[in-house]
Amino acid sequence: MEEYWTERKISLQRSTLKTQLVHYENNIKPALGRLKLQAIAYEHIQNIVNDMVDHEYSPPTVHLMYRILYGSLQKDVSAK
């Protein structure tokens, strides 16, 4: 995750990075932070999305969170 956020700091405006970090800290980290990368399954991702929908997050916000999650996991997998 650290490598993903380091790259994001370089390529994003400060306000965009802050928004993405808030979504990470509030939605992704609590749900996946205790899991090892190899243990993360489709069901974990779907549960995060379902929780956000249940809490009435807007579709663009849910999609943004998904992009953050997908990008960070892709970076972690390619780094391993």
Image: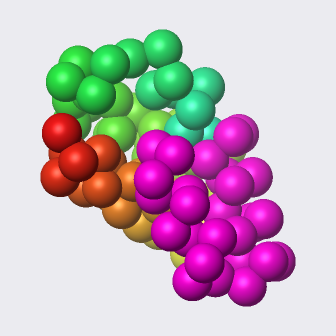
**Near-viewer residue (27 or 53):** 27
Residue 58: x and y in percent read 63, 67
- Whether residue 37 appears in this view of the structure is yes
Q: Is residue 53 above or below residue 20?
A: above
Dividing the picture into quadrants, the one containing residue 55 is top right
Of helix, strand and loop, which mostly describes the magenta segment?
A: helix
Please state the total of marks drawn on the protein image.
Answer: 0
Which residue occupies 36% across, 62% down? 71
Residue 30: x and y in percent read 60, 25
14 displayed left or right of 59: right
Q: Is residue 11 above or below residue 52?
A: below
Residue 21: x and y in percent read 69, 55
Which residue occupies 70% across, 70% down? 17
Dividing the picture into quadrants, the one containing residue 5 is bottom right
Dividing the picture into quadrants, the one containing residue 80 is top left
Q: Is residue 23 magenta?
A: yes
46 displayed left or right of 7: left
**Near-viewer residue (6 or 33):** 6
Which residue occupies 78% across, 65% down? 18
Q: Is residue 1 above or below residue 78?
A: above
40 displayed left or right of 55: left
Which residue occupies 72% across, 77% down? 16
Q: Which residues are magenta?
A: 1-26
8 displayed left or right of 41: right
- Whether residue 54 appears in this view of the structure is no
